Image (tube, rainbow, N blue to C red):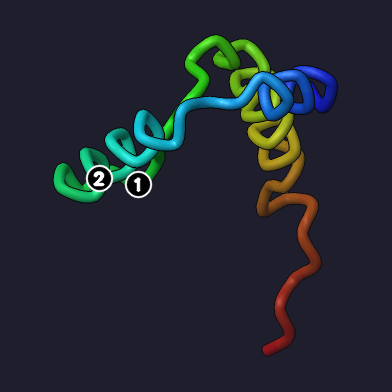
Amino acid sequence: MVAEIARQIEAGLDPATVATRVLTAIREDQLYVFTHPGMRAEVEARFAAILAAMDGVSPHNLPHARP
């Protein structure tokens, strides 16, 4: 993923294109602005790792709160 990000940065995007996407996102109240949709697989892998970590935390393996 890091290599892909570095490659994308090196290739660069037209700042006007990015600005248009950002303004559209602001106007449409979108939290995320994606400039490289080709990175979906990397985002999915990262999010899967986050979800797996969350699944490892359940009420059964957390310390009990003191009264």
Q: What element carries label 1?
A: loop
Residue 3 vs residue 23: left or right? right
Q: Earlier in the sequence, mark 2 or mark 1?
A: 2
Residue position for label 2: 23
The quadrant where residue 67 appears: bottom right
Residue count near mark 1 (Cα–Cα under 10 Å), binned few <14, some 14–19, many ≥20: few
Return the x and y of residue 20 as percentages of the image width and height.
28, 36
Of discs 2 and 1, which sits in the foreground? 2
Residue count near mark 2 (Cα–Cα under 10 Å), binned few <14, some 14–19, many ≥20: few
Residue type at the position of mark 2: Leu
Residue type at the position of mark 1: Leu
Return the x and y of residue 25 as percentages of the image width and height.
26, 41
Residue position for label 1: 31
Mark sitting on residue 51 = none
Return the x and y of residue 24 as percentages of the image width and height.
21, 39
Task: Name the residue: 46% across, 28% down.
Answer: 14
Q: Single out the residue that lies furthest toward the left.
A: 27
